[in-house]
């Protein structure tokens, strides 16, 4: 089947996470699947890349028949770059990232290694989708998220994606039968209210654990948060042009001289 | 002087980098300056945050009189969060990040720890600016970049910034006398063409060094790249709403059922 699409599967939870197995399984229906993923969890890595240090990778066994897999010492974004230049030796037809254990809706998109890998696919000009399930448990049920993959991937293969755009797909923690549908949304304006818990080492030195509470003052019914709260799968078209275009005219009124 | 603005200075090159000293020096003119920066270089860290590991910090000496400084084991984004919640115990009036050793124009914004710290300031609702100089050298001359700080900071303090927006300021490698002015721009659509050099360890294992060549097919005269090439300081308003709003109508034409 020489004309089957070449699908690169990456993640940020590491190559042994159940979510990437679920994604590779679901992707097998649509093409040849190659997995390239970090050798350890990389949650919260954002768009980090490895500069000033070496990268290693190795072929590994993967629990889905027919899938070629490599683990790397790099970040999720490094994995996309290594896959293209050193494993596939060409751009894949599709990059799928995830399935993340936990939400990447709202502001989470900027902290997320899963979504940064999908954004990096878009930077490379490849149609790319990040999938996340709103369940952090190692034993999470990925079957509804796999159904989402099977609905969304054929659409992306058929239509492509607008230049420089990838999709941020989040799936509620519900059985497939209770999911209300798929909604195209904008990223809601939520944020994290952090707290740092102070503790002492056995030797008496101080250290901190970061924790936080997600807060969403944005009640728009066109947001990813609204969709997820109402049982929908959210799809946010996501891009890497961070320009706040609406602010340019205002800034041009300042006295810069 | 109880009414002087409280200015948080952060970076990604680490607390000993000459660029953060230059930034703190220039900022002293406008308020009370507190430095919170990583204890080692964190270039390319993007919007990484430390999840699942501890953070440490300590007060350190800093080579600018009157500046209180802390180093942390965290990323640039962690530094902003730690500063607000554990050092300042309130939101500062301004976050300044940099001065980065090297460009953060165009696509570099998404890989940059410097700009991610500024974006995090914007997430927290604080007017924030990232400064970068187009010179990687440890011995770079930061005097023109300091002049840029002194032109831009008073404008930001006077006008504030549009909600959720920070500024990405890049300064060409030129003496101040040769700089043509300050231009408000959009992020150009450039990208990196990566290469991975393969080497062997003394023991015979394979490893890779990532390198790359910046490529910019976007010849728009409203871009940061155009401004910098023509001797201007570029100012790009930058936000954390990654939604590709223009793509929503198109995606709503797909068959999602």
Image: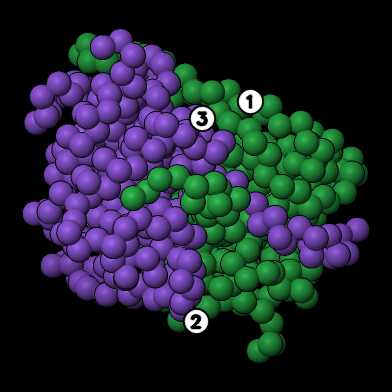
Chain colours: A green, B purple
Give the side of residue A73 with respect to residue B219, left or right: left
Mark-to-mark CA distance, 3 and 1: 14 Å
Frontmost residue, B95 versus B191:
B95
Q: Which is more toward the observer, A75 or B92? A: B92
The residue sitting at 51% across, 34% down in the picture is: B123
Q: Quadrant of the N terminus of chain A?
A: bottom right
**Residues tagged 2 and 3 counted as in contact (Cβ below 8 A):** no
User: Do pointers 2 and 3 mark residues of a single chain?
Assistant: no
Could you tell me how far apart the alpha carbons at marks 2 and 3 are, in whole angstroms? 42 Å
Query: x%, y% of residue B179?
Result: 24, 61
A180 up-or-down from B187: above or below: above
Binning the other alpha carbons within 10 Å of mark 1 as few (below 14), some (14 to 19) or many (20 upward) gives few
Q: Is residue B102 left or right of residue A226?
A: left
Side of B189 relative to A151 (left or right): left
Secondary structure type for disc 3: loop
Residue sticking out furthest to the bottom: A2
Q: Residue at x 32, y 70 (%)?
A: B230
**Which image quarter: residue B53?**
top left
What number is the disc on residue B125?
3
- In this figure, which residue is indicated by the disc labeled 1? A215
Q: How crowded is the residue under tag 2: few (<14 C-alpha within 10 Å), some, or many (20+)?
A: few
Residue placed under numbered mark 2 in the picture? A90
Residue A19: image location, x then y, percent: 62, 49
Q: Do discs 3 and 1 share a chain?
A: no
**Is residue B139 positioned above or below B223 on the image?**
above
């Amino acid at each position: 089947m020489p004309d089957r699409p070449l699908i690169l599967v990456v993640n940020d939870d590491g190559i042994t996470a159940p979510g990437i197995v679920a994604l590779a399984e679901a992707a097998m229906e649509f093409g040849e699947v190659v997995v390239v993923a970090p050798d350890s969890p990389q949650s919260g890595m954002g768009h980090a890349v490895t500069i000033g240090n070496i990268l290693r990778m190795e072929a590994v066994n993967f629990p889905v028949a027919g899938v070629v897999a490599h683990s790397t010492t790099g970040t999720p974004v490094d994995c996309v770059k290594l896959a293209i230049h050193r494993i596939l030796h060409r751009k894949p037809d599709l990059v799928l990232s995830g399935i993340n254990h936990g939400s990447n809706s709202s502001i989470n998109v900027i902290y997320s290694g899963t979504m940064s890998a999908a954004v990096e696919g878009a930077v490379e000009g490849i149609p790319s989708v990040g999938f996340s399930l709103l369940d952090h448990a190692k034993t999470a049920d990925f079957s509804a998220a796999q159904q989402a993959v099977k609905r969304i991937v054929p659409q992306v293969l058929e239509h492509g994606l607008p230049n420089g755009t990838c999709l941020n797909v989040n799936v509620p923690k519900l059985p497939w039968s209770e999911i209300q549908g798929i909604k195209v949304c904008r990223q809601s304006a939520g944020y994290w209210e952090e707290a740092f818990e102070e503790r002492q080492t056995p030797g008496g030195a101080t250290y901190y654990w970061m924790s936080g509470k997600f807060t969403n003052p944005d009640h728009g019914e066109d947001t990813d948060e609204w969709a997820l709260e109402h049982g929908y799968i959210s799809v946010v078209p996501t891009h890497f042009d961070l320009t706040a275009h609406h602010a340019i005219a205002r800034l041009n009124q300042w006295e810069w001289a």
